[in-house]
């Protein structure tokens, strides 16, 4: 029998759990050095692109095909990053090819070359230096004077708009030369000195600095306590030893203001990575990190995948934030993966928050994380005074009580700014027929037993489903009884904006939610429009963080009642975090802040604990409940979801999965219709798997998942596995 041929093992971005063997392209020897290279291969009657993740002897005796082409001269994924991604695929029980594709920027996923990261700049040549003293004053002369020191093009764009016209003149006279820059030459020197750290900050910064290898720090500091200064100190230390720092921030936290603060302080280029960049720009930052040129990368969730060949530090700001979890495709958690990477890289990782997740608090208490606390706001800023407003039996206008309106008027009158928070965008959450009780439901997201209301938008003219995007015009008359008495019920941000604009017409009223603020810089623009003059911001949780508003003296929280009685096991934690974060926006500078929380449930224990004991008291109470109920962080969960046009196949598929798990020693809930049993026309069901032992859960998944892929029923529906789900719907 002839020896089995040597092959490349290729991970393809397909929902299939195995690797694919190919012969090397003509003229290329199979060798381990090819691991991490992209490769184009034939797949069925088309072509696909994957990553070589191994080499070896062909396993089966199926027909082998030749790979078409290797795309790289050096491995794109290697060392720690490739190893960590393999770990992630295994942990999530997801196909390695899909995990690797998720980790790469789109340009590289499409097979395009790694972008050239050389940066260009200009400097005065020999002739220029001779000519400069005799030049006439003017723009070309001013530019020539600047170019005595080499300047990068981005620097010129930022500092001397319109420089290209002057440059053309200088170039035509042979006075300047184009040159290649090294990465460090690009950044202007730091323009802002670091403040002197206070005692708490200094202790935290010293603890982080004292550590060179892997350790996890929970930097638990109230809003405005100066956590960012501690990050900056740790980053400066990391840069001083010529290492790279990765800073993860929530989607909404990556504001131009925040970036400017990093840039002004660090004196090296700060690379931003977020969804607002073009594919080309993202690929470029990735390539700069890959080459080790990018020293500081500040990015949102997917930045956790950047290569860090010279890593020194990882920071996860607002580590409790929900935007770190990916909700579809590869359902990774960027904070958790950051810790995995830090361990593999043997560098410290700092998790910062004013409202740490219960997971992180639990880990800190168990001694796995070093708990660093900043208990005080910096300078003269005092914590805001929080008051619960009982609105039972009070007349409400667009959800606002008379007391709230008076407080808003008073705050504006004193020259302050006001933030009105309502976690519901649109005009009203429900459209109701006052005569017969009909209400508008989404036809694609409702079942006979479970109605999903459509939200009223456009000042009462449009209906929109926030789950599937279906839009309709508001009907002229009730479809059931033909009455003209259709009325929007309740209030969303649009309706509150309408009321406040009418009532406080002398000040600007700005609405901030996903409807009004699609673009990344729109939020910033809004804040700039407002400046520091009196005015009102109305918005959803997009307002909970981001831009500093030193003049903000009043926060009104309209309606927390949905959150108080939600069925989701994380709702109390999320509500406490949201309230504390929103409240933390008030009174950040010298002016004292006030927070009003309107509720129909003033005696709810969560509100009580939060106001009397603060976030940590709430977290303690909630941790005790989770422990008693067997929920994370005291148990480990996986959520198996299935959906199809008809309700039966998902239930059957999940029942079969449950049967396979009979002897696995797990707690299993379901199969049951999902809390939202139908979405966008699909019937949804779920199975919740849980165990107090992570190993037991993962052992069971190791056996289950291949069987799910192989199951003929799986082809009749869509299914997904969410390891460590954040929400159970
Ligand atoms: P956090 O990230 O905890 O919300 P920041 O780092 O943004 O807090 O700090 C809040 C404000 O206090 C910022 O304006 C910051 O410049 C200022 N600040 C922080 N630390 C100090 C310090 N040690 N001395 C003076 N000002 C400080
Ligand atoms: Zn009716
Ligand atoms: Zn819908």
Image (tube, rainbow, N blue to C red):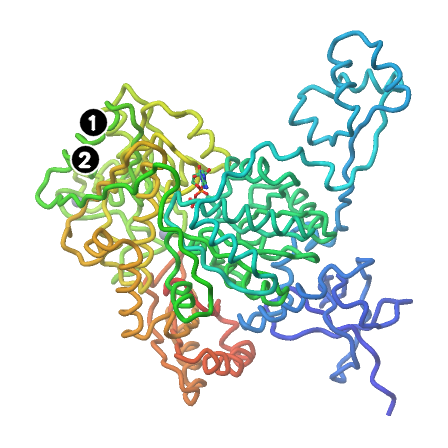
Per the model, the C-alpha gap separating discs 1 and 2 is: 10 Å
Q: Position of residue 282 (x, y in %)?
A: 64, 46
> Which residue is at the front of the view, 59 or 282?
282
Quarter holding residue 630: bottom left
Q: Under tag 2, what secondary structure?
A: helix
Residue 157 in the figure: left or right of residue 93 = right
Res 404 label: 2
Res 80 label: none
Q: Position of residue 314 (x, y in %)?
A: 57, 56
User: Which quadrant is home to the N terminus?
Assistant: bottom right
Q: In the figure, 150 relative to 689: above or below?
A: above
User: Badge 1 is on which residue?
Assistant: 410
Residue 337 in the figure: left or right of residue 568 = right
Q: Is residue 331 visible?
A: no
Residue 693 in the figure: left or right of residue 608 = right
Q: Under tag 1, what secondary structure?
A: helix
Q: Residues within 10 Å of mark 2 (few under 14, many from 20)?
A: many
Which quarter of the rendered image does ligand 1 occupy? top left
Q: Residues within 10 Å of mark 1 (few under 14, many from 20)?
A: few
């Amino acid at each position: 029998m002839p020896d089995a041929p040597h092959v490349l093992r290729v991970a393809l971005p397909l929902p299939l759990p195995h690797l694919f063997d190919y012969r090397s392209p003509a003229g290329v020897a199979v060798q381990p050095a090819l691991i991490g290279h992209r490769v184009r291969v034939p797949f069925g009657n088309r072509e696909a692109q994957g990553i070589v993740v191994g080499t070896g002897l062909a396993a089966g005796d199926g027909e082998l095909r030749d790979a078409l082409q290797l795309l790289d001269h050096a491995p794109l994924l290697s060392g720690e990053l490739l190893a960590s991604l393999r770990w992630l695929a295994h942990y999530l029980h997801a196909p390695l090819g899909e995990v690797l594709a998720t980790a790469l920027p789109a340009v590289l996923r499409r097979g395009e070359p790694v972008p050239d990261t050389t940066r260009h700049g200009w400097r005065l040549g020999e002739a220029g230096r001779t000519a400069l003293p005799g030049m006439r004053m003017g723009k070309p002369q001013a530019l020539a004077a600047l170019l005595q020191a080499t300047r990068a093009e981005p620097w010129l764009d930022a500092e001397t708009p319109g420089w290209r016209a002057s440059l053309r003149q200088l170039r035509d006279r042979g006075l300047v030369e184009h040159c290649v820059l090294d990465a460090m030459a690009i950044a202007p020197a730091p323009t802002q000195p670091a403040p002197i750290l206070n005692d708490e900050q200094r202790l935290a910064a010293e603890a982080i600095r004292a550590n060179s290898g892997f350790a996890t720090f929970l930097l638990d500091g109230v809003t405005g306590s100066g956590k960012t200064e501690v990050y900056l100190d740790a980053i400066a230390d990391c840069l001083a030893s010529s290492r790279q720092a990765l800073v993860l921030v929530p989607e909404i936290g990556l504001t131009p203001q925040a970036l400017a603060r990093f840039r002004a302080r660090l004196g090296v280029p700060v690379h931003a990575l977020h969804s607002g960049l073009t594919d080309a720009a993202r690929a470029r930052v990735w390539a700069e990190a890959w080459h080790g040129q990018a020293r500081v990368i500040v990015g949102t969730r997917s930045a956790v995948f950047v290569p860090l060949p010279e890593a020194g530090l990882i920071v996860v700001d607002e580590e409790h934030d929900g935007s770190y979890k990916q909700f579809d495709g590869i359902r990774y958690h960027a904070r958790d993966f950051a810790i995995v990477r830090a361990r593999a890289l043997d560098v410290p990782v700092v998790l910062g928050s004013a409202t740490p997740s219960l997971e992180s608090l639990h880990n800190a208490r168990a001694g796995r994380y070093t708990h660093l606390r900043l208990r005080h706001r910096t300078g003269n800023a005092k914590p805001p005074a929080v008051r619960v407003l009982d609105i039972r039996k009070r007349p409400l206008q667009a959800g606002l009580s008379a007391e709230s309106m008076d407080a808003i008027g008073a705050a504006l009158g004193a020259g302050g700014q006001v933030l009105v928070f309502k976690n519901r965008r649109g005009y009203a959450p429900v459209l109701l027929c006052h005569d017969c009780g009909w209400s508008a439901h989404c036809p694609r997201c409702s079942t006979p037993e479970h109605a999903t209301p459509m939200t009223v938008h456009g000042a009462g003219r449009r209906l929109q489903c926030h789950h599937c995007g279906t839009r309709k015009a508001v009907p002229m008359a009730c479809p059931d009884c033909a009455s003209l008495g259709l009325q929007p019920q309740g209030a969303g941000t649009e309706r509150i904006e309408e009321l406040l604009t009418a009532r406080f017409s002398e000040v600007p009223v700005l609405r901030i939610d996903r409807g009004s603020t699609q673009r990344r810089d729109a939020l910033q623009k809004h804040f700039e429009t407002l400046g520091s003059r009196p005015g009102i911001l109305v918005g959803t949780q997009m307002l909970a963080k981001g831009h500093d508003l030193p003049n903000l003296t009043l926060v009104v929280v309209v309606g927390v009642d949905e959150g108080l009685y939600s069925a989701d096991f994380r709702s109390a934690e999320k509500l406490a975090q949201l309230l504390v974060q929103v409240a933390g926006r008030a009174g950040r500078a010298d002016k004292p802040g006030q927070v009003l929380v309107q509720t129909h449930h003033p005696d709810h224990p969560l509100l009580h604990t939060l106001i009397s004991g603060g976030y940590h008291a709430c977290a303690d109470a909630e941790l005790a409940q989770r422990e008693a109920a067997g929920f994370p962080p005291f148990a480990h969960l996986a959520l198996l979801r299935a959906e199809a046009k008809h309700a039966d196949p998902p239930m059957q598929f999940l029942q079969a999965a449950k049967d396979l798990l009979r002897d696995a020693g797990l707690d299993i809930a379901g199969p049951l219709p999902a809390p939202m049993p139908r979405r966008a026309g699909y019937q949804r069901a779920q199975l919740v798997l849980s165990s107090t032992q992570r190993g037991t859960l993962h052992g069971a998944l190791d056996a289950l998942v291949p069987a799910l892929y192989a199951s003929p029923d799986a082809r009749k529906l869509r299914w997904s596995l969410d390891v460590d789900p954040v929400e159970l719907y």
